């Protein structure tokens, strides 16, 4: 990735963060922390790595994205709207009666959402099943899966890890948003995860650790993962929960919180200044 492309990805990530703040502030409350921490990943995926077509969301040749940490749906909705799946104005309807944008991802309601998620861990099994189906069809689709770090405390994730390695699902690329916080506090205090990449390697996976706010590092890791032919891949993203806004960055209370009008303006000003400096 050249410098100009990296700059575009960073700016795209800031736009995702700004739209996320605006939609949650419009509702008044929401899962802001985990949505902001994965913005750089979404910018890399929807900025070029993910094969997709906003004009044909069900295109058979598309890559699939399963956001297993479904509560971070607002961040994904922002990326989809910015890529033209639906008008930006639709973001104002987040989690309201009759909306197509519920608080957690729902494939039956939202254009561009490939799998309904929310019950933590279940998206992992779904993604592995989708990857196996593509493999059996000899299709070239890649399945990308986003897991939260607290989420991988679920045993179902490790059952999937065994299965995916056994089936040699090289078309499955997993991201762990390792932002070090979950709803009850720091992951190290709730249930320490240790060396996540090493754990996946012991299950037979290709694994890499990268800075989750560096688009070049994320892009390079994806390229390495795509070259795997015998094993699934996991990319552990070292991130900051609530990244991009001082009031939420690294704060335990950022998992889900209220956002007032004043706080929205404060966040947008900080993010706009960062955008202008990129």
Image (cartoon, rainbow, N blue to C red):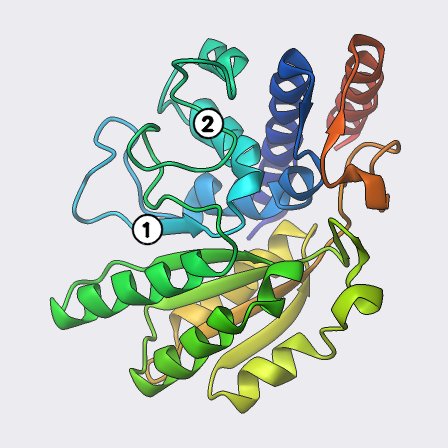
**67 shown above or below 207:** above
Disc 1 marks which residue? 64
Disc 2 marks which residue? 102
Asked whether the viewer can see residue 149, the reply is no
Q: Nearer the viewer, mark 1 or mark 2?
A: 2
Could you give the CA–CA distance between mark 1 and mark 2, rounded to whole angstroms? 20 Å
Horizontal side of residue 247 vs 233, given as left or right: right
Dot 2: what SS? Answer: loop
Instruction: Choose the circle earlier in sequence order: 1 or 2.
Output: 1
Q: Residue visible at 69% across and 16% down?
A: 28
Q: Residue visible at 28% across and 35% down?
A: 53
Dot 1: what SS? Answer: strand
Please state the horizontal and vertical placement of residue 93, each as a whole percent of the image: 49, 13
Please state the horizontal and vertical placement of residue 15, each as a whole percent of the image: 62, 26
* Number of marks in the rendered image: 2
Horizontal side of residue 88 vs 100, given as left or right: right
What is the quadrant of residue 230 in the picture? bottom left
Q: Residue visible at 32% across and 60% down?
A: 142
120 or 135: nearer the eye?
A: 120
Q: Residues within 10 Å of mark 1 (few under 14, many from 20)?
A: many
78 or 226: nearer the eye?
A: 78
**231 shown above or below 272:** below
What is the quadrant of residue 226 in the picture? bottom left
Asked whether the viewer can see residue 53, the reply is yes
Q: What mark, if any, has residue 23 been given in the picture?
A: none
The quarter of the picture where the C terminus appears is top right
**240 shown above or below 53:** below
Please state the horizontal and vertical placement of residue 175, each as a whole percent of the image: 54, 61
Horizontal side of residue 231 vs 167, given as left or right: right
Q: Are marks 1 and 2 in contact (CB under 8 Å)?
A: no
What is the quadrant of residue 127 in the picture? bottom left
Q: Residue visible at 48% across and 52% down?
A: 68
């Amino acid at each position: 990735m050249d410098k100009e492309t990296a700059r575009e990805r960073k700016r795209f990530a800031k736009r995702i963060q700004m739209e996320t703040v605006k939609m949650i502030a419009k509702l008044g409350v929401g899962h802001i922390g985990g949505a902001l921490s994965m913005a750089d990943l979404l910018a890399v995926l929807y900025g070029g790595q993910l094969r997709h077509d906003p004009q044909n969301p069900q295109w058979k040749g598309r890559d699939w994205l399963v956001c297993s940490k479904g509560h971070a749906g607002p961040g994904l909705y922002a990326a989809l709207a910015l890529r033209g799946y639906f008008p930006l104005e639709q973001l104002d309807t987040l989690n309201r009666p009759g909306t197509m944008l519920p608080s957690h991802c729902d494939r039956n309601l939202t254009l561009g959402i490939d799998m309904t998620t929310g019950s933590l861990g279940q998206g992992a099994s779904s993604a592995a099943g989708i990857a196996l189906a593509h493999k059996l069809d000899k299709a070239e689709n890649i399945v990308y899966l986003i897991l939260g770090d607290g989420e991988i405390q679920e045993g179902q994730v490790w059952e999937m890890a065994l299965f995916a390695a056994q089936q040699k699902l090289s078309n499955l690329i997993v991201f762990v948003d390792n932002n070090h916080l979950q709803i009850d506090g720091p992951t190290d205090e709730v249930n320490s995860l240790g060396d996540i990449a090493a754990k996946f390697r012991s299950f037979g996976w290709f694994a890499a650790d990268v800075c989750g706010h560096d688009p070049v590092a994320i892009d390079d890791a994806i390229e390495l993962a795509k070259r795997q032919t015998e094993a699934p891949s996991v990319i552990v993203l070292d991130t900051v929960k609530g990244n991009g806004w001082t009031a939420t960055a690294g704060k335990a209370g950022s998992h889900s919180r209220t956002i007032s009008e004043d706080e929205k303006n404060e966040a947008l000003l900080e993010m706009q200044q960062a955008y202008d400096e990129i």
